Image: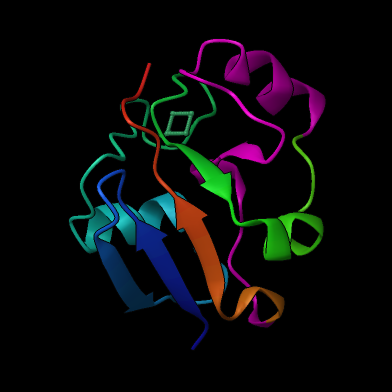
Amino acid sequence: MPKITYVEHDGTRHEIEAASGSTVMENAIRNSINGILAECGGACACATCHVYVDDAFADVAGRPDPMEEDMLDFAYDVRPTSRLSCQIKVSDALDGLVVHIPEKQG
Ligand code: FES
């Protein structure tokens, strides 16, 4: 199973095992990771699942599609590697993925 590490704003790290085919957001919720709210349940309609993909994985995780890009306009402190975690599908290629959680959502 691919491993994902979530890094909270204060530096607290959580390494979890994720099921392929699920999303980075779903795994955060399932593991009670602080700072990812996912208010719309993964419909790309709230921007409260915002994360920064670690630079080393930015290419593998891919870029936001136009719909995600539009929704990111509503996220707090957007940066070049910002993604909505509900739009990142877990696969073996993402094993070892590190995502950083912003100071706040929305
Ligand atoms: Fe709402 Fe990702 S959970 S946009």
Q: Quadrant of residue 101?
A: top left
Rendered view: 94 above or below 51: below
Q: How is the image coloured?
A: rainbow
- Who's the residue at 42% across and 50% down the image? 25
Looking at the image, residue 65 sits to the left or right of residue 3; the answer is right
Q: Nearer the viewer, residue 106 or 43?
A: 106
Relative to residue 59, is residue 3 depicted above or below? below
Q: Which is nearer the eye, 102 or 90?
A: 102
Does the image show residue 23?
no
Q: Which residue is drawn at 52% across and 10% down?
A: 74
**Residue 39 image point, x, y percent:** 31, 26
- Of all residues shown, which one is farthest toward the bottom? 1
Q: Does the magenta stretch include residue 4?
A: no
Left or right position of 58 against 42: right
**88 drawn magenta:** yes
Residues drawn in magenta = 65-92
Which of the image's four quarters has the C terminus?
top left
Q: Can the viewer see residue 49?
A: yes
Ligand 1 image position (quadrant)? top left
Instruction: Where is residue 87? Give x, y as percent.
Output: 60, 44
Where residue 34 appears, as percent x and y from the top left, is 20, 46
Residue 29 lies, with reference to residue 5, above or below; the image says: above
Total labels drawn = 0
Q: Residue at x 37, y 26 (%)?
A: 40
Q: Residue at x 40, y 35 (%)?
A: 102
